[in-house]
Amino acid sequence: MSQAFDYDLVIVGAGVGGHGAALHAVSCGLKTAIIEAEDMGGTCVNRGCIPSKALLAASGKVRELRDAYHLKALGIQIDHVRFEREDIANHANNLVAKIQSDLTNSLKRLGVDIILGRGKLVGKQKVTVDTPNGERTITAKDIILSPGSVPFVPPGIEVDGKTVFTSDQAVKLEWLPQWVAIVGSGYIGLEFSDVYSALGCEITMIEALPQLMPGFDRDIAKLAERVLVTNRDIETYSGIYAKKITPGSPVVIELADFKTKEDVDVLEVDACLVATGRIPATQNIGLDLVGVELDRRKFIPVNDSMAVLSEGQPVPHLWAIGDATGKMMLAHAASAQGIIAVENICGRTKEIDYSSIPAAAFTHPEISYVGMTQEQAKEKAQAEGFEVGVSKSYFKGNSKALAEGEADGIAKVVYRKDTGEVLGVHIFGLHAADIIHEASAAIANRHSVNKLAHLVHAHPTLSEVLDEAYKRAAL
């Protein structure tokens, strides 16, 4: 370490991305400090991935045990299933506490200095921290910004945290509304519709875009909508937006046509979850003091080495990772970005490959994907002059899925017809979030369906749905 600095590396933000960067930095021999203004672990550990998956796990068990038709087909009969909301909520809260403690202890064990307070750039290679004991100035050879994101609340929606709330409050499961409206049908909306429907709530889903699940591949979305929405008797609106939401008892939701803006309906519900995505927490972090302008959506501009950009050029010794970059707002993407940033800090030139980073919605069954949708692949094909191939296989033909009585599902492989290179894989079905990693590795290594078709998969396993799709593509 240069004697001119307090640290080799200071990381502003101790979410999953900042944590991963700190661990890698220590393994590379860097003296490291991490600054956190709120909760160690950030959104993922405290208000996102961890508590929501705990709720999904518990509510999923309730759904499974109450599915008398499914259980009878397996030769099982259960007379009555009860649950305690408080105990399910405590399961999530206890898991958060454990993961947060494990994360903090792992940093301390490796000698990372944890500084609690709000960090802000005040110049090149310098940050101030507003701690409970006063302001502290820290210098570092390199700085990584990882400020994260917060829920986006559209204009006209008033959030009181009780009857109208975001995912930040929903993960606490403080009560179960008899009728809950969910605004948005992306990952957050789908996962909470899974939780609420399993626990007996009536649901209305409101989507401003013309189709539900707008971010997913259309073949996947059509089947997932039938299984996750239609079969659960969830009322839906598409092409309709919540013009105004007023908290209270009842919550009043004024609906309007997204295109014409004409009023179409008024709902009165017990509660409303606003699941309209997230926005970067990039205000007042001092970027202007080092000549960096946020982009039009308020994200921090970065290149694929994770260097912060000013007028298109890297700012020396300044890096950014995670949700605040707007690249892929996923915890594991933030971790990958953190490792890439540290590698470049250490002089080992590396760039991130977003195409091979998978994503998943942990519904029952799950949705996962990696790489391009069919539509995106067609755009690339038109620009580069090749033809797109598509191969599909179904869980209904998979022995393991049939044995489980969980045969709703599809695997879809998008590839180049000329070289066979896999461009994207999309899965809806049992354990889709686990199966997708084989496809992620294939895309990362630019493998072709012709090679993948000759790999051997254990039988009977769910992974054979991908095996079958590869074989069909190679024919």
Image (spheres, rainbow, N blue to C red):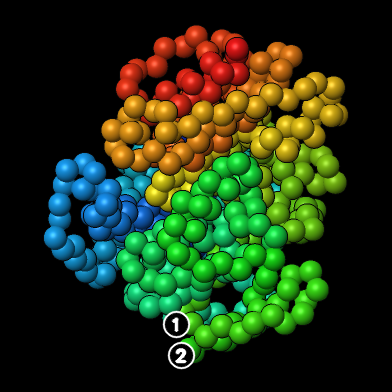
Residue 357 locus on image (x, y percent)? 57, 35
Count of all numbered marks drawn on residues in the image:
2
From what the image shows, is residue 2 above or below residue 460? below
Q: Which mark is residue 270?
A: 1
Answer with left or right where residue 47 lies relative to residue 65. Answer: right
Which quarter of the image is occupied by the C terminus? top right
Quarter of the image for residue 472 reads top right
Q: Residue at x 77, y 39 (%)?
A: 314
Residue 271 locus on image (x, y percent)? 46, 79
Q: Which residue is drawn at 61% across and 57% down?
A: 212
Answer with left or right where residue 99 lies relative to residue 204. Answer: left
- Rounded to the nearest whole Å, what is the CA distance between mark 1 and mark 2? 6 Å
**Three-letter amino acid code of the residue under disc 1:** Asp
Secondary structure of the residue carrying tag 1 is loop
Label 2 CA crowd tier, 10 Å (few <14, some 14–19, many 20+): few
Label 1 CA crowd tier, 10 Å (few <14, some 14–19, many 20+): many
Q: Residue at x 32, y 22 (%)?
A: 460
Residue 409 in sight in this render? yes
**Three-letter amino acid code of the residue under disc 2:** Ser
Q: State which tag comes first along the sequence, 1 or 2.
A: 2
Secondary structure of the residue carrying tag 2 is loop
